[in-house]
Amino acid sequence: MTRRPRPRAYLADTVYGALRQAILEREFDPGEPLTEGELCRRFRVSRTPVREALAKLERDHLVRVVPKKGAFVRTLSHDEIRDLYEVREALEALAVRLAAPRVAREELEDFEARFRELRARGPRLSYTEVRPLGEEFHRFLLKRAENAALAQVLEQMREQVRAVWTMSIVAPGRVQALVGEHLAIIDALKRGDTRRAERLMTLHIRRVRDAIFRLVD
């Protein structure tokens, strides 16, 4: 029986998803060229799905396509990082304020126990262990905030900064610091001190930004 070829749209979506994940996971360096020939060999597809995937990635602000030169992994400028993180500070603090009355103590205690387990690993702790729990905690607060507009804007912003954010957590000392910062926010929420939890979230986002600046400057 002859196998029917997969639709081109499906191939483009497959390449798009896989390449997007690879960029966000920093398999490619900022500014690295993405040549069509290499991508065709990597994904075993023709040039058309690759070009369609690159066009979608450009709309996601993850790739920069330069006419007659090709596609490159997009880098955020110092000013773009500053602007995005100034807004993110305010929005993440707002998420904490809106979520605080709606979070259950049991939920906070569960996150606290899981962060403490990570902290107990000491110098063996890696960023690949911290990142998923950190992202889960931020999304938990956003869900409890119950504000669809805030969720949409913050999710878009997180996607824009995700590549450089990943860079920040491999900075010296940041892995354990991230755990401590999240535990402090959880403690403030458990005590019902919303203002302190907001301030701690603002400081957390600012420290992430500063770690990025130290690496890109």
Image: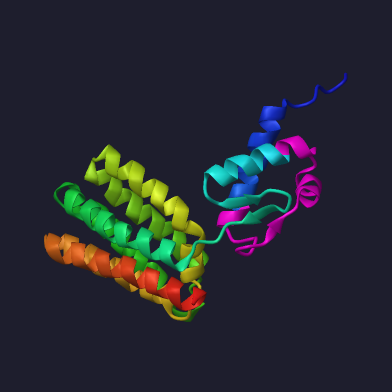
- For this view, does 165 lie left or right of residue 112? right
- For this view, does 1 lie left or right of residue 63? right
Residue 43 is a magenta residue: yes
Residue depicted at x 59% and y 48%: 20
- For this view, does 167 lie left or right of residue 147? right
Q: What stretch is highlighted in magenta?
A: 22-49
Residue depicted at x 34% and y 45%: 153
Q: Where is residue 202 in the image (x, y as percent from the top left)?
A: 26, 65
Against 147, residue 106 (above or below) is below
- How many marks the image carries: the answer is 0
Q: Where is residue 90 in the image (x, y as percent from the top left)?
A: 25, 58
The quadrant the N terminus occupies is: top right
Against 4, residue 135 (above or below) is below
**Based on the displayed image, in which of its 4 quarters is residue 110 positioned?**
bottom left
**Based on the displayed image, in which of its 4 quarters is residue 146 positioned?**
top left
Residue depicted at x 58% and y 46%: 58
Q: Is residue 217 visible?
A: yes
Q: Can residue 121 be seen in this view?
A: no
Q: Which of 66 and 84 is in front in this view?
A: 66
Residue depicted at x 23% and y 68%: 200
Q: Nearer the viewer, residue 1 or 154?
A: 154
- For this view, does 147 lie left or right of residue 49? left
**Based on the displayed image, in which of its 4 quarters is residue 143 positioned?**
top left
Colouring rule applied to residues: rainbow
Extreme residue in the front direction: 68
